[in-house]
Amino acid sequence: MRAIQMNEFGGPEVLRLVELPDPQPRPEEVLIRVTRAGVNFADTHTRTNSYVQRATLPLVPGGEVAGTRADTGERVVALVGTGGYAEYATAPRELTYPIPDGLDDAAALAMIVQGTTAWHLYRTAGRVAEGESVVVHAAAGGVGTLAVQLGHAFGAGRVIATASRAEKRALALRLGADAAVDAQAEGLTERLLEANEESPVDVVFEMSGGEVFEASYRALAPFGRIVAYGIATNQPNEVSTGSLLRHSRSVVGFYLFHCLQRPGMFTGALSDLFARAGRGELEVVVGRTYPLAQAAQAHVDLRARATTGKLLLDPAA
């Protein structure tokens, strides 16, 4: 089969197209003919071995796929851990989910990691209460486009989006944001306050780290929460206990794969998202589908913030 393999960690150039034997499923696994592989920001961290979960070489990257089961022909979406950037992948049976009729592969793939992340940012990590204001950073990305749309459905009072370009901010507004501001760190605190009608904000979903985290933290109201679910800049932050005490603020970390360790947390969120998409309540924004051989370019574009929505690889192209 054709696959993207890494034999070293580093820049996009380490993602090389190779021929490998088809993977053989274990008794607890299923073999999937991949129609689409998801590209996530976490994949770019795996490429440099800077992700939460450390990688080992050689490695076929890619943690999520959509396709058909080789044994039954059923359309499925699955969490594969690694091995997704390929024509065939194996997945644990319990992490393989049927795709509902009427939902295409791209939409299902957008839900399994990025959709469930957005869902749990509201329900589990941020615990957004009725009427609270919410800031969605990177609002034109895979998580962001879905988080913007879930805001009012989950009771948020005012949804404020940030994005780096005017066309991305326009997209966020079309998807339901009440305001959209420039994501640049300089002056961000003031822009967030202005967008929230000159009031501090209640909850921030933050995945950049560094100066954006600091600016967002300063914009929080008493009892406000900032949920850190990524560190795209690779710039970690430190918050003093004195600052937390003086402002009655909270900093919450969120890593989706802890939800897999608790029965119902993951499947419940995914089922709800599938149902909402089936009713037409969620629009999946597919940014671009790359041929498998262009996986490196997909990483470059994603890191450069040159993309919107869900990025996919087509192993057949």
Image (cartoon, rainbow, N blue to C red):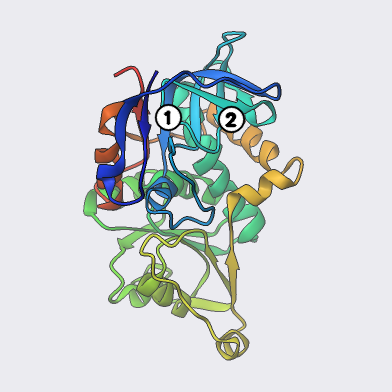
Measure the C-alpha gap from mark 1 to mark 2. Answer: 18 Å
Towards the viewer: 278 or 76: 76
What residue does disc 1 label? 37
71 or 131: nearer the viewer: 71
Between residue 99 and residue 222, name the one nearer to us: 99
Q: Above or below — where is 20 with respect to 155?
A: above
Q: Position of residue 207 (x, y in %)?
A: 44, 60
Looking at the picture, which amino acid does disc 2 mark? Phe
Q: What number of labels is visible?
A: 2
Res 87 seen here: yes
Residue at 38%, 72% in the rendered image: 210
Q: Is 148 placed left or right of 316 in the picture?
A: right
Which residue position is annotated with label 2?
274
Q: Which mark is residue 261?
A: none
In this orientation, which residue lies closer to the viewer: 67 or 120? 67
Badge 1: few (under 14), some or many (20 or more) residues near its Cα, within 10 Å? many
In this rendering, position of residue 197 left or right of residue 263: left
> Compared with residue 231, is residue 268 higher up or lower down, i.e. above or below?
above
The residue that appears at 61% across and 9% down in the rendered structure is: 71
Q: Position of residue 199 (x, y in %)?
A: 46, 76
- Residue 128 visible? The answer is no
Q: Earlier in the sequence, mark 1 or mark 2?
A: 1
- Three-letter amino acid code at the position of disc 1: Ala
Residue 194 at x, y = what percent? 36, 73
Compared across the picture, whether 308 is left or right of 252 comes to: left
Is residue 283 found left or right of 292 in the rendered image?
right
